[in-house]
Amino acid sequence: MEGRPGRAAVVVLVSGTGTLLQALLDAATDPAVPFRVAGVVTDRPDAGGLDRARATGVPTAVVAPKDFPDRAAWDDGVARAVRVFAPRLVVLAGFMRILGAAYLAEFGDRTVNTHPALLPSFPGAHGVRDALAHGVKVTGTSVILVDAGTDTGPIVAQRAVEVRDDDDEASLHERIKVVERELLVDVVSRMTAHGWQVTDRKVRLA
Ligand code: GAR
């Protein structure tokens, strides 16, 4: 899993089943892909993403809030866990917590989050459910740079997904995730290969 020396180290943060993580792990098996997954960090000891990482021999760390006296200490713990892998890019792939000041001070310039809606519409933990409840005809997925807000950072890339009349939250989320996996692999490849620039919230991938 080490790959060739030039490949950029990427750390992935997950809270759930980790199918997006799996897409990154799968992509990185191709030596031509410019990144390798150097480590996986989770807030949940039962996250399915942990098994996916272990199955590929990628080191993991669990940083569970209950093991820390307060939020700031937990946040510091996440930064410490990520630092070990010296990442060029950190990817929040289904990571369901807001990162705080200590983390952002160190990694805020190189952390992206993927979200199952077309931001700035429907931020937060229930992007698919909220879009469906609003009755939108088109939703999608967004990859954004992380800032101190909830899904408020500059948009790196987006793709649209049509809503069908008979969709429920599960069916729509599954169709979004198919697109999301592809978009995430593409964005992470481009960001690690060539870098990016941000001017007045506008992100340009080189
Ligand atoms: C993805 O759809 C991701 O956008 C979402 O969780 C799912 C994780 O799927 N994240 C958020 O909603 C963050 N606000 P996975 O566990 O199968 O990779």
Image (cartoon, rainbow, N blue to C red):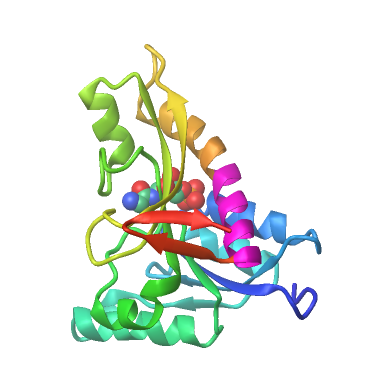
Horizontally, residue 133 falls left or right of residue 31, namely left
Residue 108 higher or lower than 163, as above or below: below
Position of the N terminus by quadrant: bottom right
Q: Residue at x 74, y 60 (%)?
A: 33
Seen as rendered, the residue at the extreme top is: 165
Magenta span: 181-194
Q: Nearer the viewer, residue 40 or 54?
A: 40
Question: Is 174 situated above or below 163?
Answer: below
Give the quadrant of the C terminus: bottom right
Examine the rendering and report whether any part of residue 36 can be seen: yes
Residue 163, given in percent of the width and then of the height, sits at 40, 20
- Which residue is most to the front? 199
34 sits left or right of 135 in the view: right
Residue 67 visible in the shown view: no
Q: Residue furthest left?
A: 70
Q: Residue at x 25, y 20 (%)?
A: 135
Q: Picture coordinates of residue 147 (x, y %)?
A: 29, 65
